[in-house]
Image (tube, helix red, strand yellow):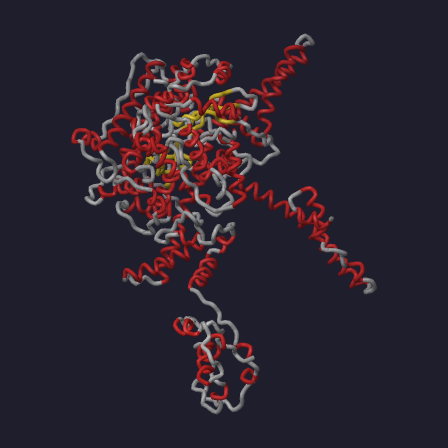
Amino acid sequence: MKIQRSATNVLERTSQYLKAGVLREKPAWFNVVGANPPSTDLTKKPKKFELKDQEEDPRNSLFKKNEATGFYKTSSDKSDRSQKHNSISRVPKLQFLEDELRNVFYQQHPWELSRPKTLIETNGDEYKKCDWSRMLQLYKPLDGESVVQRTLWLLQDGKEKGTNTSLFEAYDQARFEFYRHRMQEEMSSAVSKEESSLYGAVFASTNIEWGVKREQEHVDSWAKVASEKTKIRNANKDGKASSSIGMNDSATPSSSMWESVFESSSQSVGDTSIYENDSK
Amino acid sequence: MFRRQANIARKVFLSAKRSIHEVPSLKNEDIFSKNGIEGLYSPKGFKLAWSDYQKYLTTNLTLQTNGTENELRSAYQILLHTAKQTTEQHTFHFASQAHNNHLFFQQLDDKSRASNTRPSRFLMERLADQDITSMEALRDRLLTESDSFTGQGWLFLVELPDKSLKFLRCENDGTPYYYGKNQSLDLNGGIDEASYDKLNELNQKAANREKDFTLPILAINAWSPAYIEDYGVTGRSKYLENVWSCINWDVVNKRLFQL
Amino acid sequence: MYRLTSISKNRGVFNSILNYQRRSISYTLPAIPALDNLKISKGEYKGLLSNKAVNELWFERGGKIVEDLNKLLERKSITAPADLNELITLTFNKPDLQDIYTQASSLHNLQFAFESIRPNEDPEAQASVKVCDVDDLLKAPSIAESFPNEPTDPELIDWITSSFGSISEFRTLLLNSANSIKGDGMVWLVAQAAYSESTLKRNYLGSNNQQEFKYSNLAVMNTYNAGIVDDSLRSGQITKLKQQKEAKIASLRKKIEEKKSSAADGAVSTLEEEGMLSTLESDAANQNDFTLGTLEEAEAATLFSDRKLLPLLAIDASMRNYLIDYGIFGKQQYLENLWNCIDWDVVLQRAPTRFKKSFEMD
């Protein structure tokens, strides 16, 4: 399809029409739009041609010596001949430094991803209330994102002060500050527990016990499924070995085993109401 | 008070608005911060014991609860939710202290006004069951108990489910709402058989998941920030005497009736 | 003034331990030259505390503890040993002398902490003694690897490094532990020896035998209120109480059986005792053999009972120490200043000879 850009050309085109006499009167908007032309071109640009990373015409590389190998290319190969019109109007990939920092951070600290994260936002503008000249924020929990934002602030700060902080240095500074805060919090938690138990506080179960108990519920239901699956697998093996007749009817369960497990457990657990509704 | 808190909680839940924990405002806060509490605090003393200390507690509470399920809860709700969690005791500390300190300051008033109030007859009748038959006896008991802490602590007059009253000593950041975190023992020195039995009893109760329906009606603050500015490091006895004369019994009486 | 007056019940027991004497000793506030000079000169404790704070923390609080201690000793007509440490060890296991123990160990801890530090003469240090505000709570922490006032003695450095990894890690651990204490409490650097590895078997009263212990590594620990460092005594107590209770149950059971077998006329009293037995047993029921013990119990059974701790350094993390000069938000600043005031010469003097294992476990 031809690229549509008439919306931005509307002024130019109208003035041509006026000159040519197609239009007799100036439209009411003409002067206004002339005085305030659209500041940005809203049309989608073909990536391959108008943005910087335009590929070279494959024909230009024919019959030229390849400096690296010393060979000549005499015919176009399959990729040169392939149809590439789709890639012309593809939206360019958005790239941000933040994303790269996030990737690096969570690659190095995979367990940070296992911390629960709230998705509720009041206005979505909590980030405006943050002051990244320090690590701790009142409107934001301490997490990987803090490291990213703090790194960017340190980088900018270094530029303004002319200290020439490298990205690597800024990231390390933010990271080590983050470690310090985490260490302090962990110590605070452990000491508070020790302190209160020396004043006679008692705890019915520890967090670890609680975690093991919760996990066990899932392990138990998984064990049922697993034993059933094992049975089926063994039955299939035996079936193959002895006879091939009726194998399919005997070995495939009628419904997903997880469903039946959850159905049976939902009555006792009570808070898996989604499954309850499905079964009724 | 608790009905009010429940209402607030409902409102907060409905609008689900994220925000940070702030210092609650007191009834006469403007006057107090300008003149102090007559007969108890100078303006500077009031600033440390209430404005600064409460700011310290709520800021820390915000830092600990930000982005967690405790974010929208009041200090009272947070202390209940974290009391049994072994890894959340630091959050519990800030919540419990913030709640206790608020409870304490709600019942304070200028000496001239506080001296016009009396514990209700109803309250004194209940106290008579504890062999406290006069105001003097109540005063002596209150001051003796609250000045006997080795370190920091709270003294509460609590109402038990059977409607009887009792004095409850809480070491450090102990809370009256849950027996497992009352912290009424000091195991830092020798342990006598009574404390050992008490500890066993608490463990047993916790293992049986027994519930606690105790509610405080009077709180006395024996933490350093409450007196160090005006009375010095060793001035706790003098401070406690002054606290006694600045208790607005109307507030305390209301707590008893409303519950 | 309103202190509880619990009257000692078994004074006789205590007196027999002490070889009852009629000579009365009263304690006095120990002399620490650095502090006494400040009282005369009315100067500041440089780089850490104002004169007012020193006066209140040491002279007033210390004086009050001494006064209360002497009063208690007099009231209970107890002749105390001249050495405060001995008094602490003697009173530790006696719950009815808890108030004496509390005052004695408070005094000991206070003195120990003030003796671990010296004024910081750095002219810039005094500027950091100031009231902090709420923003200091959120301040970005320093990530530096080296700090002023690190120990200089190579042997001490080596010992700290092999116990904690590095001086900086040790400093972080020490200050974080102190910062985490919410009420009253102290952080200690202690040298640790295992009883099982030492030539002498455990001996509670044998403070003169310290040299015989083989102190192999250093550790950081907290005590709260009037707690003391060598807490193997405390965990021993809980086991002792448990054993006492078990013995009580056993003896009751025996009595019942005897009575049952002897005559029928004992039926009434047997019933009574059976009731007692059942209440006692229900108390002990939650510690039956079917449940796996808690982590604390495991620690008490293995760790604490086999260690001897010798304090080298104490940091007082109680609120009163920083409230006067630094305000409620100033704990971190106070602790950093305190680090700069640590007198490593004193620590070195207190340190026992290090026992190096002939091979390393890792």
Give the farthest residue toward the front.
Answer: A24
Of residues A186 and B95, which is closer to you in this image?
Answer: B95
Q: Nearer the viewer, residue B50 or C184?
A: B50
Q: Residue furthest left?
A: C41
* Quadrant hosting residue C332: top left
Pinpoint residue A120: horizontal percent, then vertical percent. 51, 50
C346 left or right, relative to B118: left
Q: Where is the N terminus of chain A found, in terms of image quarters?
A: bottom right
Question: Measuring 56% from the left and 24% from the top, which residue is drawn there?
Answer: B161
- Please provide percent x and percent y for residue B50: 36, 33
Rendering coords of residue A43 (x, y %):
48, 73
Which residue, as the protein is rendered here, is positioned at the far top? C265
Q: How many marks?
A: 0
Q: Is any atom of residue A141 visible in this view?
A: yes
Q: Is residue B94 left or right of residue A86?
A: left
- The answer to whether C31 appears left or right of A104 in the picture is left
On the image, which quarter does residue C174 sit in?
top left
| Residue C129: x %, y % from top left | 25, 40
Name the residue located 41 percent from the left edge and 47 percent from the top edge. A138
Location of residue A157 with respect to A84 vertically, above or below: above
Asked if one can make out residue C103 in the rendered structure from this viewpoint, the answer is no
Which residue corresponds to the image point at 48% horizontal and 85% vertical from the top-left? Answer: A57
Identify which residue, C49 or B17, lies in the foreground: B17
Q: Residue at x 73, y 53 (%)?
A: A228
In this orientation, which residue lies closer to the viewer: C17 or C229?
C229
